[in-house]
Amino acid sequence: MAEFHYLTVARHQERILHTVPLLPEEQVPLAAAAGRTLAGDAVAALDLPPWDNSAMDGYAVSAADTSAATAEQPVRLDVVAELPAGTDQDPALATGQAARIMTGAPMPTDADAVVPLEDTVGWDPAAPTAGTTRPDHVDLHSPVRAGRHVRPRGDDVRTGHRVAASGQELTPHRLSAVAAAGIAEVVVRTRPRVVVVSTGSELVAPGAPVRRGQIPDSNSHLLTALVRAGGGEVIHRGQVSDDPAQLRDLLVSTVATSDAVIVTGGASVGAHDVARLVLAPDAAGGVPLERRSSAEGSPGAGSPTPGGTGDGPETPADPRARLDDRAVRFDRVAVQPGKPQGFGLLPDGRPVWSLPGNPVSAWVSYLVFVEPGLLAMQGRETPLADWQPVTTADGWRSPPRREQFVPVRVVSAPGEPLRVAQATERGSGSHLAGRMARATGLARVPAATTEVSAGDTVLYRALEG
């Protein structure tokens, strides 16, 4: 029996991350920056806060004026000013004077502490006029220390300090921090413009009549949504038949308008597997793309080392496979589902992923292999997803020497330690498209594990967000 080489998941991911090109930079206003990846540090344009300000609604005072205050003998201060948020006033305060101040208002130069409204003698929040009129004086029954309830200038961020780092995604909370630091525009990576194409003469549009042998195209919709969720822009979504010329024409027609291509279906070794026939460098019987005139010195230069084909015992990845081999090649990856994987650079320099056509396989393949690549193109500092340990509520079998990714759903109650169970209740069947909607995440089973039992620990990646 012939022996065939299998790439590990980590090895295939590593090749992708070393191969994809970095997209160019552009400067955009904050209104257009949500979800983008910073291409340079976002540096504060001002101190935050820009001036000492009040952390409470109350009275700005000099702490020295309150030192003698007791419950038996309150200290009375004259209220000489009113300071709402947004004011630019800086009233002078003599000894024995205070200013009523609102949260966020600048502190008077002559004050060094704030006494909250509720800490003053006679404060009654239920009174009809509570907080609406400025009193002539305020009585304090206890001293206040200097700096109490004051937010010092620059206490959060100083001018010139980094607010968000290059390679970070501008999530809502980072975007807020950048805006608070007075930054109006940021330098980000351009969004990857992606072509998404499903292959197969059996595919029809969702909702169209389905005759014997046909199925609705779900993969292009799945991948389009995933690309957009990851910060990409889908410039073409569609399907082609098993005629190699159609795929070839689509690739040629989108060269000028796209940065990457994702193809599903036709990645295996069947006679009509169009993706392999068109994309493989030596696609016997296919319609290969025009080859480079000289591989030497070109951006995608390298000698492809195709993965094994056919059935055979699984062995470690071929040691001849080089990370700098950028030409499109098809490998068998030690993963379930999604063993046949195609990846590399097209002659025009665009990375192309060729994924299996079964919907669960395409889904898992995108999350494990395509998503990290598209994030790396955007300069993301951590393109690989985080996985957390969880407990299983049921058991299943896992193939030997292959990492397994199983759609699962959370079955634990809110507040309990996470427990998950199979979403499909039939393992990781790659064709179970209709049951994918039940999943809340993926469970990851190591290659050394052949059986998962209830109560075991596996790694989990939630899909929300």
Image (cartoon, helix red, strand yellow):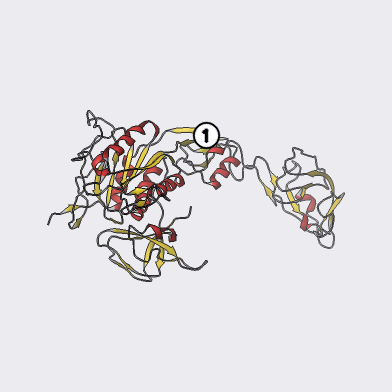
Residue 446 visible (yes or no): yes
Count of numbered circles in the view: 1
* In-image side of 210 versus 316 (left or right): right
**In what quadrant of the picture does the N terminus appear?**
bottom left
Q: Residue at x 80, y 50 (%)?
A: 65
- Where is residue 430 shown, x and y percent of the image? 33, 57
Given the current orientation, which residue lies at the most extreme bottom position? 454
Towards the viewer: 448 or 149:
448
Q: Residue at x 44, y 38 (%)?
A: 191
Density class for disc 1 (Cα within 10 Å; few <14, some 14-19, many ≥20) is some
* Location of residue 181 (image quadrant): top right
SS at mark 1?
A: strand
Towards the viewer: 179 or 142:
179
Given the current orientation, which residue lies at the most extreme left position? 1
Given the current orientation, which residue lies at the most extreme right position? 136
- Where is residue 171 shown, x and y percent of the image? 52, 46
Residue 324 visible (yes or no): no
* In-image side of 54 versus 287 (left or right): right
* Location of residue 288 (image quadrant): top left
* Location of residue 398 (image quadrant): bottom left
Question: Which amino acid, mark 1?
Answer: Val
- Where is residue 161 shown, x and y percent of the image? 54, 39
The residue carrying mark 1 is 28
- Where is residue 415 shown, x and y percent of the image? 52, 67
Towards the viewer: 73 or 221:
221
Given the current orientation, which residue lies at the most extreme top position? 293
